[in-house]
Image (tube, grey):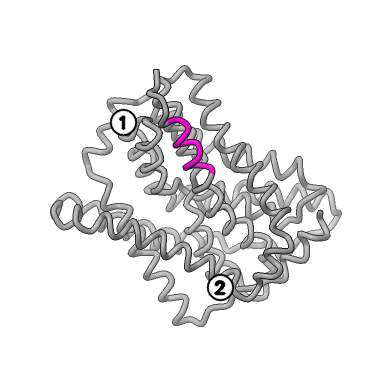
Amino acid sequence: MYEQLLSLDTIRINFSEGGMHAVNIVLAFVMFGVALGIRFQTFKTILRYPKSVIWGFFSQVIALPAVTFLLVVAFSKFITPMVAMGMILVAACPGGNISNFMSQLSKANTELSISLTAISTALSTVMTPFNFAFWGGLYVNFINRQAGHALQELHIDNYQMLETVFILLGVPLLLGVLTSRFLPKIAEKLKKPMQYFSIIFFAGMIVMAFSNNFDLFLKYIFYIFILVFIHNLLALSTGFGIASLFRLPEADRRTLTIETGIQNSGLGLILLFNPKIFPPDMAIGGMLFITAWWGIWHIISGLSLSFYWSRRLPK
């Protein structure tokens, strides 16, 4: 399995400077659309559900990256460093906005879902670079001790990542929240079209990632599928386990499960496409495949779980 996954690292996605600017602008519009659903009163939910919000934040931002690190260490003999770093990158991303729809479908606590998405997205300008640098650094040190040599190709410009995430997420989020606050009618009209646009945009990024490597994708999808399946199942289980451990209401348990298992992997792809963060000469194909397939699979798993829960009301 290790040898098969190693061949994925040779894949590279190169954009011209103009093409990269275009992708960044489009992502900024997507994040602006996400923020249109965030209102100032959304954060009042923290006062209504303080216990659930605290443990939801802990599950998403602290527990998931930590559990992912333990997973890649346990699988270190079977997966390549770049595949492992891709799993860490996904875990470092904030929750995906589709989780709000899934929470509504599964008869979970939708207000809590919106609040957790808003909080994790707002704090991702700091927490995404921090979690990737911290847990990725621990993993690199672990691999270096195992291999007996330094993996120079895993060096990431964390300052550049912080700057990129802040520009791509922080600014559009602020503008979206302000639009929702002062222009609510316009925000309501734009919200639905922007959600559809974000799905189309993500699908387009996956097509770009695999267009020149589709044969290789089909050849090794089995290995990627197994890894993402285990990782996503562990993420869902982490959310449900923490919510159950601290005896949250069943509706909140469903919300934490979905919020922890649904990640904004589109942001992960954008970071991978950025040559200032991941230079073109860096072999990051393993990270790319994991991140892209996660974006497909978490929709399948999340909707499946939501449809299952939609059949009965929470206690």
Query: Mark 2: which amino acid?
Result: Pro
Q: Quadrant of residue 280?
A: bottom right
Left or right: where does residue 192 sit relative to residue 30?
A: left
Q: Position of residue 101 (x, y in %)?
A: 36, 43
| Residue under label 2 | 275
Q: Quadrant of residue 80?
A: bottom right
Q: Nearer the viewer, residue 280 or 138?
A: 280
Q: Where is 183 relative to 252, above or below? A: below
Q: Secondary structure at mark 2?
A: loop
- Graded by Cα atoms within 10 Å as few (under 14), some (14 to 19) or many (20 or more), the crowding at tag 2 reads some
| Residue under label 1 | 46
- Kindly report the distance in space between the C-alpha atoms of the residues bearing marks 1 and 2: 38 Å
Picture residue at 51% right of the left edge, 54% below the top: 265
Q: Where is 233 relative to 208, above or below? A: above
Indicate whether residue 308 is drawn in magenta.
yes
Q: Residue furthest front?
A: 311
Picture residue at 66% right of the left edge, 54% below the top: 85
Magenta residues, start to end:
301-309
Q: Nearer the viewer, residue 301 or 242?
A: 301
- Dominant SS of magenta comes to helix
Q: Where is 256 relative to 68, above or below? A: above
